[in-house]
Amino acid sequence: MKDGDLLEFGKVCLKVLETPGHTREGISILVYDLKRSYSTPHSVLTGDTLFIGDVGRPDLMASIGVSADELAGMLYDSLQNKLLPLPDETLVYPAHRAGSMCGKNLSTDTFSTMETQRRYNYALQPMKKNEFI
């Protein structure tokens, strides 16, 4: 599947968002509850791109020749262009929570909202790309 692809079944629609940064292959999946809205996502499954309180580390792929700076730039673009524009009420479900080396500030919470992440996640605060990297 690629960016923008849809999968609909019953009253649920899934939309793929390519969100590289933790890895080049990173994706997030928007979940639409079609009983509520065809245009506003109910939730987003963020994989290892966006965690509760953190984002995926971009330095774990160095062993296969992908630089941390390259992935950090991709991660910044994914956050700015794909995830931050989501509505405040969109629920955020990451792949996992604290206990992994994928981030330094992972919460034990299993979900949040985009509004809360915008407000409290240090990596989502306003900054220029070079500052983020």
Image (cartoon, rainbow, N blue to C red):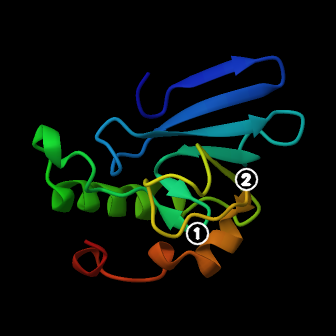
In the rendered image, the residue lying farthest to the top is: 9
Q: Identify which amino acid the numbered label 1 is placed on.
A: Gly
In the rendered structure, the answer to whether residue 79 lies left or right of residue 65 reads right
Q: Position of residue 48 (x, y in %)?
A: 48, 47
Residue drawn at point x = 27 percent, y = 74 percent: 129
**Closer to the camera in the image, 132 or 1:** 132
Q: Position of residue 116 (x, y in %)?
A: 70, 73
**Closer to the camera in the image, 17 or 95:** 95
Rendered-image quadrant of the N terminus: top left
Q: How many residues crowd around disc 2 within 10 Å: few (fewer than 14), some, or many (20 or more)?
A: some
> What secondary structure is marked by label 2?
loop
Q: Is residue 41 visible?
A: no
**Whether label 1 touches label 2, CB < 8 Å:** no
Q: Identify which amino acid the numbered label 2 is placed on.
A: Thr
Earlier along the polypeptide chain: callout 1 or callout 2?
1
**Closer to the camera in the image, 103 or 118:** 103
In the rendered image, the residue lying farthest to the left is: 65
Quadrant for residue 61, please give it: top left
Which residue position is annotated with label 1?
53
In the rendered structure, the answer to whether residue 85 lies left or right of residue 88 reads left
Rendered-image quadrant of the C terminus: bottom left
Residue drawn at point x = 30 percent, y = 80 percent: 128
Quadrant for residue 63, please give it: top left
> What secondary structure is marked by label 1?
loop
In the rendered image, the residue lying farthest to the right is: 35
Q: Is residue 15 visible?
A: yes
Which residue position is annotated with label 2?
110
